[in-house]
Image (cartoon, helix red, strand yellow):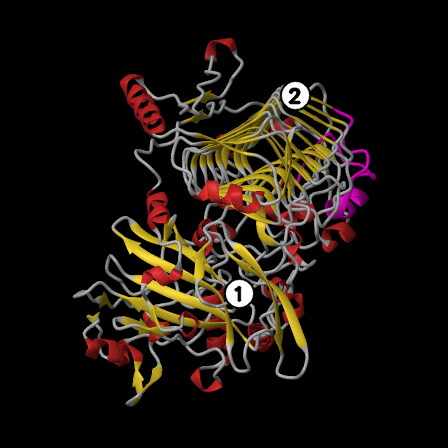
Amino acid sequence: MNTSFAFNPRSATDSSSGCPQASLGRVCGWQFLCLLVLAVFSASARADTYVVPPGPDVQYELQNRLIESTPGDVIQLEAGRYEFRGELNLNCGHVTLKGRGPEKTILSFRDQQAGSDGILATGDGIVMEDLAVENTVGNAIKVLGAKGITFRRVRTEWTDGPKSTNGAYGLYPVQCSDVLIDSCIAIGAADAGIYVGQCDRVVVRGCRTERNVIGIEIENTHHADVFDNLSTDNAGGVLVVDLPGLPVVNGEFTRVFQNKIVRNNLKNFAPQGNTAADVPDGTGVMVLAANNVEVFSNEIVDHGTANVLIVSYLVAGRPLPKTKYDPYPEGIAIFDNTISGGGRRPAGKLGALVTPFVGGRFADIVMDGAQDEAKFVDGKLPEQLGIRIAGNDGATFVNFNLARLSPAAVLSGQYRVDRELGAYAGRLPKLAAVTLQPPPPVMGENAAVAVYRAAPRRLSEWGLFGGRMAEQRPVAGVIPYELNTTLFSDETSKHRFFRLPAGTQVRYRPEGALEFPEGTVISKTFAMPRATGVAEGAERMLETRIQIRKESGWYGFSYQWDDEQTDATLVLGGGVQDLEWRGHGAEVHSNRYEIPNANQCLSCHGENGRFVPLGPTAGNLNREVETPKGAVNQLASWQAMGVLAELPGLAGVPKLPRSEDPQSGTVTDRARAWLDVNCAHCHRPEGSARTTGLDLRMLQGDAARYGVLKAPVAAGRGTGGRKYDIVPGEPDESILVYRLESTEPGVRMPNLSRNLVPTHGVELVREWIRLMPKTEKK
C-alpha cells in the first residue's frame, strides 16, 4: 500500500522582489495544517497504486479501474501505446492518473467511436501527469465542475497536423476552481490547446503550445495567472476573452506575464461558425471584452495582425444578449513588454475591415476604441476602467475607432484612425497574484464503489422477473410504467419497471423525477425489434440498466444480455454489440450498439454531480395506459394502488406531449418535448452541458437560452460551418439540426447511446424551426 498526497505548495509570492509569482494553498496557520492532516489521513486510509498496462482489453480494464477508484488511489499507466475506441470517464475525486512521461505513455483515440472527449473527469483533487492523449474526436481532456485540479507534464496532440477536423480543446477545465496547469504541451487543437473556461483561480505556467488555432485561452474566468509559457506557431498566441450567453460572464483579474509569445502566424483552421474562427491569423495577445487584465514582462514579437489586440465584443458582429453582459474591455494594462514586428500582414475579417483605413498595415498594439459611454464621468471613463499602455520599448500603436467606422463617415471623410498613444499612456494599480487553495479533503471511500461491489453480478439475482428472463414478466411488487415521450436509443424498444421497498410510497413532485424512497430499484431493458437470429416477432434483449437509491443517493449501471437470451451480466466498464435487424421491408440494417459505462451514466443523469433518474417525471408519466380493466390514467392508478402519495387532482398535474402524436400538442410543443427528453438532461442549468449556456428544457421560455440566434460555445467542428444554434425559419442553417442529423463521433448529439439518426425527432425539430418567423441575423 502506498500513501499519496498530490498537493505541492510551490512558488510563494515575493512582493519585495518585484517578481510576482503564483502561490499555492495560501491559508493561514492552523487552518492549513488541519486541511493537510485531513487530506493525508483520507489518502492514507486507502491509497493504493494500481498498474494498468496496455493491452487489447484496456478500454474496459482501465475504465473499470476508474469506476472502482477511491480517494487517494494512484492509477499507474506504463510506457507504451494505449488504444481506445471510446471516452474514458473519471468521477471519483482525489485520484492520480499518471504515466511514465508524455513521450512514453500515449493514450491514442485515433479509432474513437463513442463519446466527445478522450478523458472526461468531474472529481475534486484529481491529478493527471506524465502522459499524452492523442487524436481524440473532440476535446482531449475535459474536467467539469471540480476543485483543486492539477495537470502536470501532460501532452495533448493531434498528430496529423492542423486540420479543422481535429478536436476543439487539448486541456479543458471548465467551471472549475483552483486549477494548476504545469509544464504541459498542447499541439494541433482546432480551437485552443489550453482552454480555461468559466473557472476561478487558475495558474498556467511552464507550458508550450504550438500549431493550435489558439495557444492558451482564458475565457469567462476570474483570477488567472499565465506565466513562463512558450506560445508559437499558433494562429493566436494567448487570448483573454469574455463571451456572452454563458452561465459565468464578465471574467476579470487575469495576469499574462513572463511569457514568450512569438510568431503566431499559422493560418486559422478553426471550423467556421466558432468564435475561434474569427481570431485573425497573426495575433500575439488578444484581450476581448475581459476586464482587469495585465500583460507585462512578456516577449511578444513578429505577429502579422498585431502583437497585442484589445477589442470589444462588438467586433464579432453577432447580436448581444439581453442578459447581463459587459462587451467592453476595461481596466487593461499593457506594460514593460518587449514588443516588435507586429501588424505587417493583417488577416481575417478584422484585417479586411480596417486595413484600407490604416495604410495596409496595423501596428504592434491595436485597439478598437469602443467604450461604454453609460459609465462616463465628466465625459470619460473613470481611471480604473481605462486602458493604459507604458514601457513597451517603442511599440507602435493604432486605435481604429470602431464606433466611428460607418459608410457615411468614410464617404464624408470624417473617419480617422488614431495613432497617438498619449490618451492611453500610463499605468494602473497592479493586480494581486493568484492564490490556489488545496482541494477539499475527502474522508472514506468513494460511496459508489461500495454500491458497485455489492451489486449482483447477474440480472436474475435482482429477482425482478419470473419465468424466462427475456420475456420481462415482472414478479409481484414490480410495477411497469410507460412514458409520453421517450429517449431515442438507436431504434431500440424499452421495457420499464420499478420496485419499492415494502410499505413505502413514491411522493409526487411537479418538476423533476418523482421522489422515490430509499431502496427503490428502477429497471429499463433495451431491446431490438426484428433482430436477425431471433424468432419472428421476438426481440433481442441488449442491455438492462439498473438504478438503485441508497441512503447516499442514486446509482446506475448496466447488464449486458448473453447471446442465449437467458440472463445478463454486470458490465461496469460498458460494452458493445454488433447488431443486424430487418427493416419494415426486406432490407437488413446494422449498428454497433454501445452500452455506457457506469461513470458515463452520470454524464446524462448528473445534476450538480449527483445521479438522478430522468424519465419518471410527473409530466412524462401523466398518460393513459392499458390494463386488463381498460385504459386508466397511470398516476391515478398508482394512487389507487397506494404506491403514490400527494398526487393533486389530475387537472393540476403537468402533462408532457407525446412527440409522435399530433393530437397531443402543437409542433412547437411536441418538438420541445422531444428535445426536453433527448437533450435537456445535459442542456440544463444543472446538467453536464450547462457550460454551453444552451438550455433545452421545455420550461425554458427565453428563446435565446434555448438557442435562437445563440452563438455556439465549444462546439468545434460540430458547428458544420453554421453560426447559430437555431436560425428561425432556416433549419439547414441551424447547428441544432446539423448535430442531430450527424452520425459522426464528436459531432453527433446526443453523443452517447446513439449511432443512428433519430429520424422522427429530426423531422419534428426541423418543422418547428421552419415555422419560426424569420428574424434578421448578422
Q: Kindly identify the residue that appears in the image at 20 percent across and 67 percent down.
A: 505
Which quarter shows the N terminus?
Answer: top left
At label 1, which amino acid type do we have? Answer: Asp
Image position of 616 (left or right of 236) = left
Which quarter shows the C terminus?
Answer: bottom right
Please state the extent of the stretch shown in magenta in the rendering: 340-369
Point out residue 668 in the picture as x, y percentages from the top left corner.
50, 76
Point out residue 352 in the picture as x, y percentages from the top left corner.
78, 47
SS state under label 1: loop
Point out residue 145 in the picture as x, y percentages from the top left corner.
44, 43
SS state under label 2: loop
Magenta highlight on residue 409 = no
The answer to whether mark 2 and mark 1 are in CB contact below 8 A is no
Q: Residues within 10 Å of mark 2 (few under 14, many from 20)?
A: many
Magenta highlight on residue 363 = yes
> In front: mark 2 or mark 1?
1
- Asked which quadrant contains residue 8, the reply is top left
Point out residue 651 in the picture as x, y percentages from the top left corner.
27, 81
Residue under pointer 2: 337
Q: Kindly identify the residue that appears in the image at 29 percent across and 65 percent down.
A: 514
Q: Kindly identify the residue that appears in the image at 30 percent across and 19 percent down.
A: 33
- Asked which quadrant contains residue 31, the reply is top left
Q: Determine whether 489 is above or below 634 in the image.
A: above
Residue under pointer 1: 563
Image position of 243 (left or right of 302) = left
3D distance between C-alphas at marks 2 and 1: 68 Å
Q: Farthest top residue?
A: 17
